[in-house]
Amino acid sequence: MNENKVPSIFDQIERYVLNQMTQQERHMFESELNRNEKLRAEFAIQRELILSVQLGGMQETLKRIGAKISIAAAEQPVRSRGFIWGRAASIGVILGIAAWLALRPGESEKLYALYAINDPGLPVPMSAVDNYAFFDAMVDYKAGSFAKARSKFESLLILNSDSDTLHYFIGATYFGEGLYREALDQYQLPEVSNSATWAAKAQWYGLLSHLKLGNNDKVMAVETLENSSYASAIAEIKQKLAD
């Protein structure tokens, strides 16, 4: 057996979802995911399968509960067994529905998984003397140290409170941590700025944040900015939510 063989795409997706990749592996996988539509589609499918495995684990727990109820029923007089089994059936139905609702991803959740990739950040020059503080924060951001990067970006914001770039990347640190409401607060300024690049990126990640939060009405209300590189993806998401 060749121990050096390249992991299959399914292995890579599983390791990514279960957070078993190194930082370098995650970066490479996310880069590929960002440019490969077929991979994004497969990623969404496999992620749902992993959730179904979790559901299977919960079903095993329900079986153990059922076994205990069976023992209790056997030890009770005949007249009381009907009550025990009736209660057991009710508990089983309630727990089963709760498990299904808790683990079954909604449409917005599935779309988020299909399209959402953390912004990889800006390239860090070999020599960043002219703007050392900013690129020092960017190094932390690219390493996934989002809170640390945010602290540094916020320090720079004190001297440049209207910076689209700083607000955007502070939002990106929140997005990376799954703090979508906080991210939305930061994306507001870049989204209305005169910089087409930051405005389009802020609109895209703001839309993804609303998607993750289940704010489908806000997603549908988005008016895609002119010449946005995310226009086709936004249109696809809105179409799928409307179907």
Image (tube, rainbow, N blue to C red):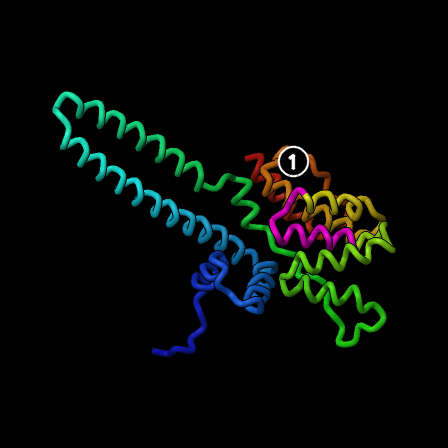
Q: Is residue 82 left or right of residue 180?
A: left
Question: Is 180 in the magenta?
Answer: yes
Number of labelled discs? 1
Task: Say whether residue 169 is magenta.
Answer: yes
Q: Tell me: 84 left or right of 91.
A: left
Give left or right: position of 149 versus 72. right
Q: Quadrant location of residue 122?
A: bottom right
Label 1: state its secondary structure.
Answer: helix
Q: In the picture shown, does residue 109 fall above or below 177?
A: above
Q: Could you say which is closer to the camera, residue 33 or residue 99?
A: 99
Q: Which residue is mark 1?
A: 220
Question: In front: 51, or 159?
Answer: 159
Quadrant (top left, top right, bottom left, bottom right) of the N terminus? bottom left
- Please tell me which residue is depicted at 69% across the width and 48% down the height of the picture: 204
Identify the main secondary structure in magenta. Answer: helix
In the image, 42: left or right of 210?
left
User: Could you tell me residue 222's position as x and y percent?
Assistant: 70, 38
Q: Residue furthest top?
A: 79
Q: Residue at x 68, y 64 (%)?
A: 140
Crowding near the residue tagged with mark 1, few <14, some 14–19, many ≥20 C-alpha atoms within 10 Å? some
Q: Which residues are magenta?
A: 166-181
User: Which amino acid type is shown beneath numbered disc 1?
Assistant: Met
At x 35%, y 35%, the residue is 96
User: Residue at the location (40% across, 38% down)?
Assistant: 100
Question: Where does residue 131 sit, x and y in percent of width and height?
Answer: 83, 67
| Residue 45 percent location from the top left of the image | 46, 51
Question: In the image shown, does 112 or 241 lie closer to the viewer?
Answer: 112
Q: Is residue 15 above or below residue 64?
A: below
Which residue extends farthest left?
Answer: 78
Image spot of residue 37 (x, y percent): 56, 56
- Quarter of the image for the C terminus: give it: top right
